[in-house]
């Protein structure tokens, strides 16, 4: 028993050392430009707007303008406590032309993302949207084409992109320690938007089949599709099977609230369990290889099993700037201090694939048939 404990302790020490090495190499380029990024906000109805508010005095970005078409929401939002009245605009184009931001972050409905990119791209202004990229493949491809034509970046922000445990999991997988991959299970969701107290300005479009493109399949299915695409190096899947349900039709009559999506790749099956019906908040995954597994339990905690030996829970090392935060990442990318690669979590390439997976999932559930990805 003592020998086993010593062995496990050694395994944890090795993993920690590998993690530190990964952190130092993967994050070798940091944002160094001290000038704040000129940032504009398009829309204020998304529940994630608090990410701007909580960082507004940090110093790495300066909010130069806020667009919101709805008069009530434009006059009543959390940014009002921090910014003068003259920075709030009803017209997106006027806001862009007068404030001249380097980048825009979108906090309206998912359907609105296309209009933001259409306004920003000809003005050569970079865009970061909240997940997912788009409601339809048509919109996603239009955004990709605009980005290519005008030489801008269109990035997608996911909370899980900044999880140290996810990055450490990928490092272990890439090392081949757990052997050949054959299954990835990703779990995302919570009790439901109404159940956790999301504001009506958010749920009005979040629960709309057009403005959000669906319910839980879009809101949380995108996480698993994004991470799987990243872990598999940008690979496009062969086919998708899915079941979308309304477990609580009295609360969510227009959209699904529970989605089970099976995504088939050559040799690897990914299962995405996205739901507004979980009895608790969760964003976790299990990655299985022939020699073991990696379990990402929380944003920081994880465990492994390799050749029959469990590591026990341990903390992944903190990610280094600018890879630890969406706004630092955006600034570094805009200033050319880092390069966004096609396989990266935020990239337009990754996120067009994500939208294709989710659209195929909706079609599969509707038709009861497997849908091939083109």
Image (cartoon, rainbow, N blue to C red):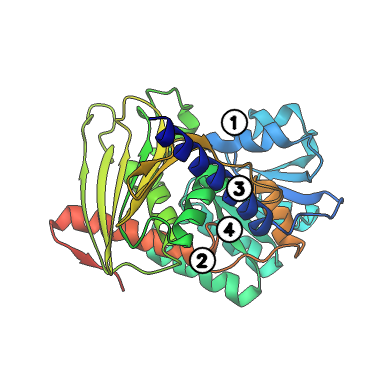
Kindly identify which residue carries mark 3. Answer: 17
| Residue at (29, 30) in percent of width and height | 277
The mark nearer the N terminus, 2 or 3, is: 3
Classify mark 1: helix, strand or loop. Answer: helix
| Residue at (46, 27) in percent of width and height | 198
The mark nearer the N terminus, 4 or 1, is: 1
Do residues under tags 4 and 3 come within 8 Å of each other at their CB atoms? no
Kindly identify which residue carries mark 1. Answer: 72
CA distance separating discs 2 and 3:
26 Å
Furthest toward the right, the residue is: 34
Please name which of the two marks, 4 or 3, marks the residue nearer to the observer.
3
CA distance separating discs 3 and 1:
52 Å
Do residues under tags 1 and 2 come within 8 Å of each other at their CB atoms? no
| Residue at (83, 54) in percent of width and height | 32
Instruction: Indicate which disc residue 155 carries.
Output: 4
Please name which of the two marks, 4 or 1, marks the residue nearer to the observer.
4
Classify mark 3: helix, strand or loop. Answer: helix
Instruction: Say which of 288 and 358 sits in front.
Output: 288
Instruction: Say which of 224 and 57 sits in front.
Output: 224
The mark nearer the N terminus, 1 or 2, is: 1
Classify mark 2: helix, strand or loop. Answer: loop
Quick one: label 3, few (<14), some, or many (20+) residues within 10 Å?
few
CA distance separating discs 4 and 3:
31 Å
């Amino acid at each position: 028993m003592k020998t086993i404990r010593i062995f496990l302790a050694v395994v944890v020490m090795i993993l920690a050392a590998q993690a530190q090495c990964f952190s130092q190499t993967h994050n070798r380029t940091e944002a160094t430009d001290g000038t704040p990024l000129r940032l504009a906000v398009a829309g204020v109805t998304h529940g994630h707007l608090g990410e701007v508010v909580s960082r507004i005095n940090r110093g790495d970005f300066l909010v130069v303008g806020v667009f919101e078409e709805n008069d009530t929401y434009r006059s009543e939002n959390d940014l009002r406590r921090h910014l003068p009245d003259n920075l709030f605009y009803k017209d997106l184009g006027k806001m862009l032309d007068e404030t001249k931001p380097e980048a825009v972050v979108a906090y309206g409905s998912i359907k609105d993302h296309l209009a933001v990119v259409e306004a920003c791209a000809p003005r050569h202004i970079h865009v970061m949207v909240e997940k997912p990229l788009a409601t339809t493949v048509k919109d996603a491809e239009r955004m990709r084409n605009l980005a290519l034509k005008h030489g801008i970046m269109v990035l997608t922000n996911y909370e899980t992109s900044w999880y140290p445990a996810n990055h450490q999991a990928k490092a272990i997988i890439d090392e081949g320690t757990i052997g050949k991959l054959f299954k990835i299970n990703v779990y995302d969701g919570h009790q439901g938007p109404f159940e956790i107290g999301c504001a009506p300005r958010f749920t009005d479009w979040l629960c709309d089949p057009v403005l959000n493109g669906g319910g839980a399949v879009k809101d949380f299915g995108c996480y698993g599709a994004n991470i799987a695409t990243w872990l598999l190096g940008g690979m496009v899947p062969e086919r998708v099977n899915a079941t979308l349900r309304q477990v609580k039709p009295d609360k969510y009559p227009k959209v699904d609230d529970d989605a089970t999506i099976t995504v088939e790749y050559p040799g690897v099956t990914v299962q995405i369990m996205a739901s507004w019906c979980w009895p608790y908040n969760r964003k976790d995954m299990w990655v299985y290889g022939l020699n073991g597994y990696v379990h990402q339990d929380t944003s920081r905690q994880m465990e492994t099993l390799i050749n029959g030996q469990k590591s026990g829970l341990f903390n992944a090392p903190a990610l280094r700037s600018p890879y630890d935060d969406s706004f630092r990442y955006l600034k570094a990318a805009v200033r050319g201090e880092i390069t966004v690669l096609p396989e990266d979590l935020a990239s337009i390439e990754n996120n067009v694939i994500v939208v294709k997976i989710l659209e195929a999932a909706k079609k599969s559930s509707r038709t009861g048939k497997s849908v091939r990805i083109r």
